[in-house]
Image (cartoon, helix red, strand yellow):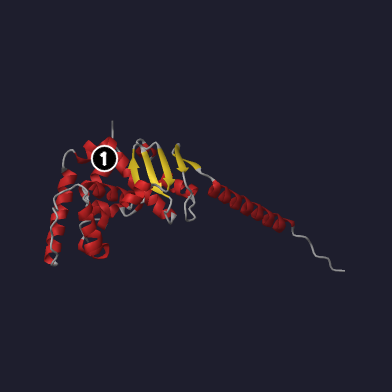
Amino acid sequence: MWKQEWNWPMQNKKNRLNIEKVIAESLKKQNKQRREFQLFGRLFYLNEPFIFPIDVAAVIDDIETIIPPHLFEEVDQIMVGDFDFLHDKAREGEYRDGAIYITNQIATEKDLVENIVHELSHSIESKFGHFIYGDMLLHSEFTGKRRRLKAILEAEGWELEHNFLDTEYDEEFDSFLYKDIGYIKLDAYISGLFVSPYAVTSLQEYWAVGFEDYFIGDREYVRKLSPQLFNKIEGVLYYDN
């Protein structure tokens, strides 16, 4: 009489894979229910949970892999929630009073990483502001690009009423870029000048967008396009007290 032989090694392997799958799903479920996390030892707190499914633990792993921990010296905590001051400014994130605030309406893990790195760059300004802006090299690079953009827009027939040499953020100027021109058209106009349309809006955003692109975008492109900006980022990264 034929009798099937039991394949113990194969069965053990299947059992082990099933156990690992159960553990992984359990950890994933726990992370979804968690509100408190740690990013470089700093509180990462979900004041309100994300509307969309976001793997916070994976985001933290990504950030701790790409960003050196000493750059978080000016950040005490990261807070996620439905904050009025973000709604009022139509922003997804903001750095203020030692904390990074992020809207809970972030759609993807990639968006969350980008927003945290972007706001991290603004926290760095509070410590390294003089180094970044004091010698006016970054200012000169930025205003030079603004002048060239103005010439391009005039050649394209745009009527320009805004001061392109004003480096501070101006809501009307931002609206002109975003609504009147539109970021799709603007992206074509700024080719070879700025890494993204939002970098045009102010000197501080020029710094922040470049910082973001240095760590999670095309670092070599930042170096070629904006050498002074690249040097400032590297200067902060390797700053010697």
Where is mark 1, residue-wise?
235
Question: Residue at (15%, 49%) from the top-left corner?
Answer: 166
Residue 66 image offset from top left, x and y in percent: 39, 46
Does 121 appear above or below 146?
Answer: above
Crowdedness near tag 1: few (<14), some (14–19) or many (≥20) residues, C-alpha within 10 Å? some
Q: Which of 15 and 165 is in front in this view?
A: 165
Q: Which residue lies furthest to the bottom in this view?
A: 1
Q: Dividing the image into 4 quarters, which one contains the C terminus?
A: top left
Q: Dividing the image into 4 quarters, which one contains the N terminus?
A: bottom right
Asked if residue 167 shows in the view, the reply is yes
Residue 57 image offset from top left, x and y in percent: 49, 47
Question: Residue at (57%, 47%) from the top-left corner?
Answer: 30
Q: Residue furthest top?
A: 241
Q: Is residue 222 left or right of residue 42?
A: left
Question: Residue at (22%, 63%) from the top-left corner?
Answer: 180
Asked if residue 67 shows in the view, the reply is no
Residue 195 image offset from top left, x and y in percent: 26, 56
> Which quadrant of the figure has residue 120?
top left
